[in-house]
Image: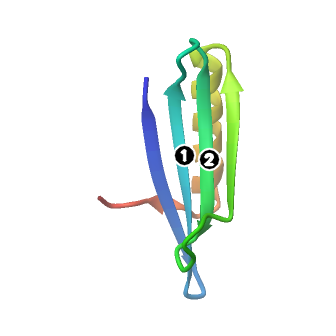
Amino acid sequence: MWRKTLVRRTECGNTRYYRLELHPTLFNEYIVEREYGNVRYRRPTGIKIDYFYDEESAKSRYLSILRQKKNKGYRDQLQ
């Protein structure tokens, strides 16, 4: 399973982004990777990586983070 989502939020002329990925590793584990920052800057403000042993736990965490961000006002990026 591979999922990738990019959401953005603009507030007072400042646009923040949040990229969220869920993908398997070579060792039958799963990674939920988060990258966030401001679109004005080249580098992200932060990157966080969580490892999971099963797909269901990883998927649950991915959806939980996405729900939290959408509740804060982040919206899907149009591609």
Q: Within the image, what quadrant is residue 30 found in?
A: top right
Q: Position of residue 34 (x, y in %)?
A: 62, 47
- Pointer 1 and pointer 2: residues touching (CB < 8 Å)? yes
Residue 6 relative to residue 13: left or right: left
Mark 1 lies on residue = 20
Mark 2 lies on residue = 34
Which residue corresponds to the image point at 60% horizontal and 53% vertical from the top-left? 35
Q: Within the image, what quadrant is residue 55 found in?
A: top right
Quote the CA–CA distance across marks 1 and 2. Answer: 5 Å
The N terminus: image quadrant: top left
Q: Who comes first in sequence, dot 1 or dot 2?
A: 1
In the rendered image, the vertical position of residue 53 relative to residue 15, given as above or below: above
- The amino acid type, in three-letter code, at marker 1 is Leu
In the rendered image, the vertical position of residue 64 relative to residue 10, given as above or below: above
- The amino acid type, in three-letter code, at marker 2 is Arg
- Front position in the image: 20 or 74: 20
Which residue corresponds to the image point at 56% horizontal and 12% vertical from the top-left? 28
Q: Position of residue 18 (x, y in %)?
A: 57, 57
Q: Position of residue 51 (x, y in %)?
A: 69, 27
Which residue corresponds to the image point at 64% horizontal and 61% vertical from the top-left? 72
In the rendered image, the vertical position of residue 4 relative to residue 70, given as above or below: above
